[in-house]
């Protein structure tokens, strides 16, 4: 059996915020912070929001960029159009399968 060059990792995270964060708000913040960390220009290593519900979500990345993706999540401190909402993102678990990640969500 051949080993894939880029294996997927799924990072389960939780957002601590005074209100419910919308999916689009978090995606915009994720894109903004990823561009600051220069993670948005590499197709194979670009993090992707797989699931998001009630301030909990799953971020997909490659196994080689897992540490960078966790650092990206932990660096997000503001979301919203005008960065008006202060948040804290905590990573809860990293999994190699989406099924196990969804069980933790």
Image (cartoon, helix red, strand yellow):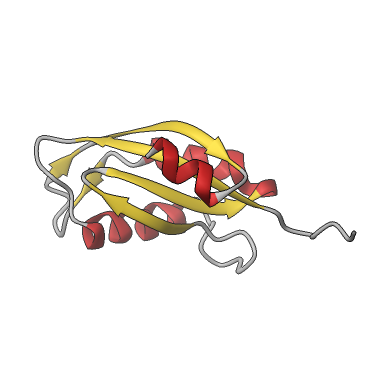
Residue 86 is situated, as x and y percent measured from the top left of the image, at 17, 38
- Whether residue 72 is visible to the viewer of this picture, yes or no, is no
Residue 43 is situated, as x and y percent measured from the top left of the image, at 60, 69
Of all residues shown, which one is farthest toward the right?
A: 1
* Residue occupying the point 57% across, 53% down: 61
Question: Exactly how many numbered labels are in the figure?
Answer: 0
- Whether residue 103 is visible to the viewer of this picture, yes or no, is yes
Q: Quadrant of the N terminus?
A: bottom right
Residue 10 is situated, as x and y percent measured from the top left of the image, at 53, 47
* Residue occupying the point 51% across, 57% down: 47
Q: Quadrant of the C terminus?
A: top left
Closest to the observer, 59 or 2: 2
* Residue occupying the point 61% across, 66% down: 42
Residue 66 sits in quarter: top right
Residue 62 is situated, as x and y percent measured from the top left of the image, at 64, 53
64 relative to 49 in the view: left or right: right
* Residue occupying the point 48% across, 43% down: 101
68 relative to 52 in the view: left or right: right
Q: Is residue 94 above or below residue 57?
A: above
Residue 81 sits in quarter: bottom left
80 relative to 92 in the view: left or right: left
């Amino acid at each position: 059996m051949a080993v894939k060059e880029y294996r997927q990792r799924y990072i389960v995270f939780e957002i601590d915020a005074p209100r419910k964060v919308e999916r689009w708000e978090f995606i915009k913040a994720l894109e903004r912070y990823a561009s600051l960390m220069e993670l948005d220009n590499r197709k194979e290593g670009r993090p992707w929001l797989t699931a998001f519900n009630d301030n909990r979500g799953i971020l997909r990345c490659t196994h080689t960029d897992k540490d960078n993706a966790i650092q990206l999540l932990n660096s997000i401190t503001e979301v919203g159009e005008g960065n008006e909402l202060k948040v804290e993102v905590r990573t809860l678990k990293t999994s190699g399968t989406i099924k196990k990640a969804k069980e933790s969500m």
